[in-house]
Image (spheres, helix red, strand yellow):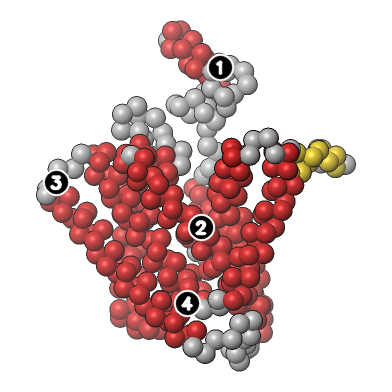
Amino acid sequence: MGDHTATRNLQLHHNPVFDVSLNVEGGSNYIDDDGRPKRTGTVWTSSAHIITAVIGSGVLSLAWAMAQLGWIAGPIVMVLFSFITYYTSILLAACYRDPVTGKRNYTYSDAVRSNLGALQVKFCGCVQNVALFGISIGFNIAAAISMVDKGFHNPYWLINIANAAIVIHLVGAYQVFAQPIFALVEKTAAKVFPDSQFITKDIKIPIPGFGVYNLNLFRLVWRTFYVIITTLISMILPFFNDVVGFLGALAYWPLTVYFPVEMYIAQKKVPKWSTKWIFLQIISLSVLVIALAAAAGSVSGVVQNLKIYKPFKTSS
């Protein structure tokens, strides 16, 4: 036990996450088995984060989608895709440990890298960036619709509650989904231009009662520019159902189905052409076909709307 404790203390001492070594026996409540700070999330906080991330702008088009499918096909499709998402989430959770070292992967991309290799990570990164940027636009579209929609007026209190709910959701969700894009751009810029004071220098601003705020001019300028651009794009392309449908189709299959299935097959070494392998591939292929069909339908809808669309104008 003493040797194990000493070894763990040495590992923690060289871990950049910690400034000083910690006694494992005394501080076991604060670190996990990888020597990193324990996550403090609970079922409630996790559920709140999932609601913020998943129940986004797309849910606003759910009523329209159900109306197109009808009372029979609509619920069936909802239950089917709920099951697929739940099942692939279980597969994904089983792949967050490195198959060789057994250490936990802390990001989606790290899990893909450890199970499928660097080439797949590039594809994953491209899809995530396309999806994150698109979701940001989708959030702005939802906000615009909540403010300018004229197709439904009564009862007014219901519309006001709906608008308030959307704003509350967007404030948190926009931040959650924008942070990875901010981090990617700022990290890349710092690497490419390490000597640029505009990019790397922090201006310390003392704030009474708060402390010192580090203002970075590059972050201020580029993040403001990003919000303006996504807002303008959402105003120019207010085809809510079609845009959200296309973005959802673009990201759903690779991120929710393809990568979890392929990672699970690689980590568990599922034999090719076995019953389980065939079952997993059928799920992946089926969702791909549906996603392509949904994307094609969304593009067709956008094309039709462009024929009668006038930028920055709403129709009553």
For label 1, the residue is 13
Query: Which numbered disc covers residue 272?
Result: 3
- Tell me which amino acid carries mark 2: Leu
Question: Dot 2, crowdedness within 10 Å: few (<14), some or many (≥20)?
Answer: many
Residue 166 showing in the rendered view: no
Q: Are the residues at dot 1 and dot 4 in contact (C-beta closer than 8 Å)?
A: no
- The disc, 3 or 4, on the residue closer to the chain's N-terminal end is 4
For label 2, the residue is 132
Spatial CA distance of label 4 from label 2 is: 17 Å
Mark 4 lies on a secondary structure that is helix
Question: Residue shown at 49%/54% (left/top)?
Answer: 129
Q: Is residue 262 left or right of residue 163?
A: left
- The disc, 3 or 2, on the residue closer to the chain's N-terminal end is 2
Residue 289 showing in the rendered view: yes
Q: Is residue 1 left or right of residue 143?
A: left
- The disc, 1 or 2, on the residue closer to the chain's N-terminal end is 1
Question: Dot 4, crowdedness within 10 Å: few (<14), some or many (≥20)?
Answer: many
